Amino acid sequence: MNKNQIIILSVFLGYLLFNVIVSFVYSRQAEKKLHTSSEKKYFIGGRNMNGIVLAMTIMATYTSASSFISGPGAAGLTYGYAQTWVAAIQVPVTFLVLGVLGNKLALVSRRTGAVTVVGYFKARYKSDALVVITSLGLIVFFIAQMISQFTGGATLISSITGMGHVTSLLIFGTVVVLYTAVGGFSAVVITDTIQGIVMCIGTFLFLFFVLKAGGNLAAIDAGLADNLPGVYDDIFSKYTPGGLLSYWILVGFGTLGLPQTAVRAMGFKDTKSLHRAMWIGVLICGFVIVGMHLAGTWAGALVDTDNLPTSDYFIPYIVQKIMPSGIAAIFLAAPMAAIMSTADSLLILATAAIVKDLWKNYVVKDDPAKNEAYQKHVKAVSGILTIILGAIVIFLTIDPPDIIFMLNMFAFGGLECTFFWPLVGGLFWKKGTKQAAVCSSVGAVAMYIFATYFIHVAGLNAVVWGLLVGAVLYFVIGAVTGRKGLDQDILDQCF
């Protein structure tokens, strides 16, 4: 390991340690201030997020390894400006999620006491089958998405320090699992806020040093003409119309069905915080997403990248070429922050699915003695389970996938097919019944998996077919089975 790598590794380890310390301290202080159950403290942070924290945690949870590594890398190596235009569809995600789900989901979750999206399903549909199906779907697809995030973290550390994949994976995985297990939701949101700030700083540094290394935009254009001749090709020369539609659904409209972002709409403090978060989120997400992809495109003019194994190595490679070691370490904390903020959110929600949605509902139930023991030990049990889940993901990531982006997008689509129509339809359509929700969730996922392997029409991603089938099943079966109307209890609590 050379001097530059030692400097970068030292800053990296310092940043990781800083996250652990802050999460421990903040979660302890937050728990003392919150006068609510251990369950609500651990899984939803007492519903106490202000506008800045809410915006940062949604943005940080949504942006991931693909936002800082794979996407900008693909822009610099292959797709040029077209990749930047396509990525821009992600900018209004915070506004979309909070604008559509925010007030309604927050009110209903408070009335019902739900601290997870599956908990909302239990109150809205009163269906044990739906609770089990969506909990298992969440766990499976979250594990797939966590593998992509842990792979991204390990790849980043390995590429800048020269350490082996397994060693890098253990460093990254241990830190994320540790602070998530001990601190719970409060630790996750405060580290997400820190990481959101780091992402903004990293994006600025990348833009600045790419422009500095390139000299000016005219020189960058000249370099792109040699290294990336198709940099100015329009979107439709790089993507089919079906592929564009699929991407816009997958990372735009479909994000309403992602439980890791929807649960944030259950945890804000008041309406003022919600409205403030909507605008802050758009501005920050726009700067990070568009800034990183634009700079990634420009970076394609600066170096010969023929020897890179995949686009996932492009950003770490270019950063070490154009930035001083200390500055490079600060920048590389930004993609690490994006990866960590997604991984910790997935971990805490996977734990919640097992502890709150399965164990509490079907083992503890309404038994007074079991409930007392549950409230007493929920934090300890959740922490241990988080460590176990993290260890499983680390083990599965020892032999990683080649392209982080592909695995991450597959998990995205699976989660959207599982949750979209039961969540969105359940909030706004009174005829949505438990039969409709169960059939929609199962049918959408089955179609998504089938279409992934067997349906290849007009470049459409399988998520389009999955959501389409889910919509038909939800509204047709709901119209048939919902003629008598919902139980009065459901109407009182959910509408």
Image (tube, rainbow, N blue to C red):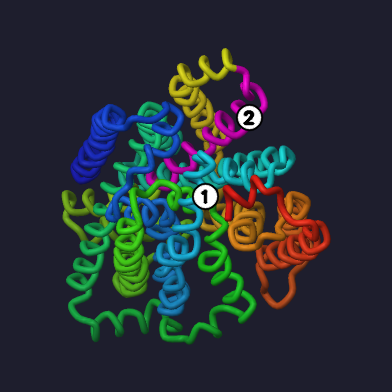
User: Is residue 249 placed above or below 180 in the rendered structure?
Assistant: below
- Please state which amino acid type lies under the numbered disc 1: Val
Instruction: Report whether 423 appears left or right of 440.
Output: left
SS for callout 1: helix
Instruction: Report whether 442 appears left or right of 98.
Output: right
SS for callout 2: helix
Q: Position of residue 273 (x, y in %)?
A: 31, 56
Q: Which residue is mark 1?
A: 108
Work out which quarter of the rendered image holds the C terminus and state it.
bottom right
Identify the magenta region. Answer: 340-367
Q: Would residue 358 be counted in the magenta stretch?
A: yes
Q: Position of residue 150 (x, y in %)?
A: 46, 42
User: Is residue 394 placed above or below 412 in the rendered structure?
Assistant: above
Q: Position of residue 270 (x, y in %)?
A: 34, 52
Residue at x 45%, y 17% (from the top left corner): 376
- Label 2, label 1: how far apart the Cα atoms are: 19 Å
Count residues near mark 2 (Cα–Cα under 10 Å), then give few for <14, some for 14-19, many for 20+: some
> Which secondary structure type mostly characterizes the magenta part of the structure?
helix
Does residue 463 appear in this view? yes
Q: Which residue is mark 2?
A: 361
2 vs 1, front mark = 1
Work out which quarter of the rendered image holds the N terminus and state it.
top left
Does residue 449 appear in this view? no
- The tag earlier along the polypeptide, 2 or 1, is 1
Residue at x 38%, y 30% (from the top left corner): 36
Q: Position of residue 157 (x, y in %)?
A: 35, 43
- Please state which amino acid type lies under the numbered disc 2: Asn
Instruction: Report whether 229 appears left or right of 239.
Output: left
Q: Would residue 195 be counted in the magenta stretch?
A: no
